[in-house]
C-alpha cells in the first residue's frame, strides 16, 4: 500500500485544526488587555507594576496547571466538552476582572481565564489535532499553536485604542462578551479522529517503554525544565515591550505596534518552523528556534532607537515562532499517543509557568532597578540554560540511535 493510502490525514482534520486555531486566538487574547494596559492600570489603581504583571502571570499559571487535568480528561471523553466549558470560563473571567479590584483581577485571570478557561484550549486541542495527522503533524501543530501569536498580532492595537477611548475595564468586559459568543460555536466543530492506520500505529512509541534509553518520566521532566527556561526568556519582551518603549520616550501606541509586529512575525514564521520540524524533528527545531531567540533577545540590550526596536522585535518574533509547537511534536515523537494529552499538558504547564515567571520577573526587576536592562539579561541566561538541556537530549538521541543501529551499519 502506498504511503499516501496509509495516511490518516483528511479535510476534516484541517477543519478541526482551523477551528482550534481560532479558539486559541480568541481565548489567549484576553491576557493582552493587561499587557497593553499595564501602565494605565497600575497608575489608576495606585499599584506597582508587579500587580497587573502578577494577574497576567496567574492566567498563564492557571492555564498550565489546569492543562494536565484537561488533557487527561480530553484523552478519555474527547475535546469538545472541555473546550466548551473553558470557552465560557474565559468570557466570565474577563467580565469578573473588569470589576477593577485587585482580587477580582487575580481571580478572573488566575481561576477563570487560566485554570478553568485556557487550560482546555491549549494542550487538549494540540493533542487532539496531533491525532489527525501523520505526514504533516508538525505543520498542523504549528498552525494551531499560532493561535497565541495571532492573538498577539491582532488584539494589542485594538486594545490600545479601546483602552485609550473607553478604559481598561470596559475593554475587558466587552472582550469577555465577545469570547462567549464566538468561542462556543467554534467548539462544536471539534472532533476526534475515528481511526488510525496500521502503519501509523506501528510507528508509535510503546506506552511505558524507555525513551532515549532513559526512564520516560525523566525525559519528560527534562523537557519540562527546558521549556520553563526558554519561556522565561520569551515572556520578557512579550510582557513588557509596550512599557519598555514608553520608558524610552516613545508613545504607547508604538509599543503596542512592536508587540503586534513581534507576534505577527511569530505567527508567520510558525508555519515555516512547522514544515521544518516535519523534516528534522521536534527537538532539533527547538534547538534552532531557541538559539535564534537568545540572539535576538540580546538585541534589546543594544538598541534604543525606534527603527532598531522594530527590527529586533520582528526578528525576536521570527526566532521564537516555532519553539512551542516543536515541543508538542517532540512529545508525540517520543511518547505513546495514548498519553499525549496529559504529557503535553505537563510540558505546557512548564511553558506557561515559564511565561508567568518571566512576565512577573520582568515587572519585579523593573520595580527594583527602574530599568528593563537587567531583566532582559536574566532572560538571556535562562535561554542559555534551555540550550544546554535540549542540546544534551539531542546528543543522547544521536548516541541512542548509534546503539540501536545494526552491526556494520
Image (tube, rainbow, N blue to C red):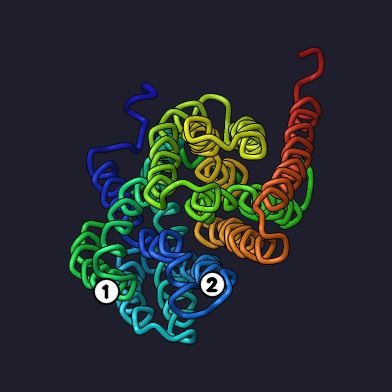
Which numbered disc covers residue 58?
2
Position of residue 29 in the picture relative to residue 294 (left or right): left
Quadrant in which the C terminus appears: top right
Q: State the count of labels.
A: 2
> Which is closer to the viewer, label 1 or label 2?
1
Outermost front residue: 249
Kindly report the distance in space between the C-alpha atoms of the residues bearing marks 1 and 2: 21 Å
Which residue is at the front of the view, 167 or 407?
A: 167
The quarter holding residue 136 reads: top left
In x, y percent, where is residue 385?
A: 77, 45
Which numbered disc covers residue 220?
none
Q: Residues within 10 Å of mark 1 (few under 14, many from 20)?
A: some
Position of residue 47 in the picture relative to residue 269 (left or right): right
Which residue is at the front of the view, 386 or 84?
A: 386
Name the residue that disc number 1 marks: 170
Secondary structure beneath dot 2 equals helix
Amino acid at each position: 500500500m502506498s504511503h499516501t493510502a496509509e495516511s490518516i490525514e483528511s479535510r476534516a482534520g484541517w477543519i478541526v485544526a482551523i477551528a482550534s486555531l481560532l479558539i486559541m486566538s480568541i481565548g489567549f487574547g484576553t491576557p493582552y488587555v493587561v499587557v497593553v494596559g499595564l501602565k494605565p492600570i497600575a497608575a489608576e489603581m495606585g499599584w506597582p507594576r508587579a500587580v497587573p504583571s502578577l494577574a497576567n502571570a496567574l492566567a498563564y499559571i492557571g492555564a498550565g496547571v489546569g492543562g494536565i487535568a484537561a488533557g487527561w480528561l480530553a484523552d478519555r471523553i474527547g475535546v469538545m466538552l472541555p473546550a466548551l466549558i473553558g470557552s465560557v470560563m474565559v468570557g466570565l473571567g474577563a467580565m469578573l476582572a473588569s470589576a477593577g479590584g485587585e482580587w477580582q483581577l487575580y481571580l478572573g485571570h488566575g481561576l477563570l481565564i487560566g485554570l478553568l478557561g485556557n487550560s482546555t484550549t491549549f494542550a487538549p486541542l494540540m493533542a487532539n489535532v496531533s491525532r489527525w495527522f501523520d505526514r504533516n503533524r508538525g505543520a498542523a501543530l504549528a498552525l494551531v499553536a499560532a493561535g497565541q501569536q495571532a492573538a498577539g498580532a491582532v488584539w494589542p492595537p485594538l486594545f490600545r485604542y479601546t483602552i485609550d477611548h473607553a478604559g481598561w475595564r470596559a475593554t475587558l468586559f466587552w472582550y469577555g462578551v465577545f469570547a462567549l459568543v464566538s468561542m462556543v460555536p467554534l467548539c462544536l466543530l471539534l472532533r476526534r479522529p475515528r481511526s488510525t492506520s496500521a502503519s501509523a500505529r506501528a510507528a508509535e512509541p510503546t506506552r511505558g517503554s524507555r525513551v532515549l534509553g532513559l526512564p520516560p518520566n525523566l525525559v519528560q521532566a527534562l523537557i519540562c525544565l527546558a521549556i520553563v527556561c526558554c519561556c522565561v526568556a520569551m515572556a520578557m519582551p512579550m510582557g513588557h515591550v509596550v512599557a519598555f518603549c514608553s520608558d524610552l520616550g516613545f508613545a504607547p501606541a508604538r509599543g503596542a505596534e512592536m508587540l503586534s509586529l513581534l507576534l505577527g512575525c511569530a505567527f508567520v514564521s510558525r508555519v515555516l518552523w512547522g514544515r521544518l520540524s516535519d523534516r528534522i524533528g521536534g527537538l532539533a527545531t527547538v534547538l534552532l528556534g531557541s538559539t535564534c531567540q537568545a540572539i535576538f533577545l540580546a538585541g534589546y540590550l543594544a538598541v534604543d532607537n525606534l527603527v532598531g526596536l522594530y527590527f529586533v522585535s520582528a526578528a525576536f518574533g521570527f526566532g521564537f515562532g516555532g519553539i512551542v509547537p516543536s515541543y508538542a511534536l517532540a512529545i508525540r515523537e517520543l511518547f505513546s499517543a495514548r498519553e499525549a494529552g496529559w504529557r503535553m499538558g505537563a510540558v505546557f504547564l512548564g511553558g506557561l509557568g515559564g511565561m508567568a515567571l518571566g512576565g512577573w520577573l520582568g515587572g519585579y526587576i523593573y520595580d527594583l532597578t527602574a530599568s528593563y536592562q537587567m531583566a532582559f539579561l536574566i532572560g538571556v541566561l535562562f535561554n542559555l540554560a534551555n540550550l544546554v538541556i535540549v542540546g544534551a537530549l539531542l546528543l543522547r538521541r544521536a548516541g541512542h540511535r548509534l546503539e540501536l543501529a545494526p552491526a556494520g551499519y
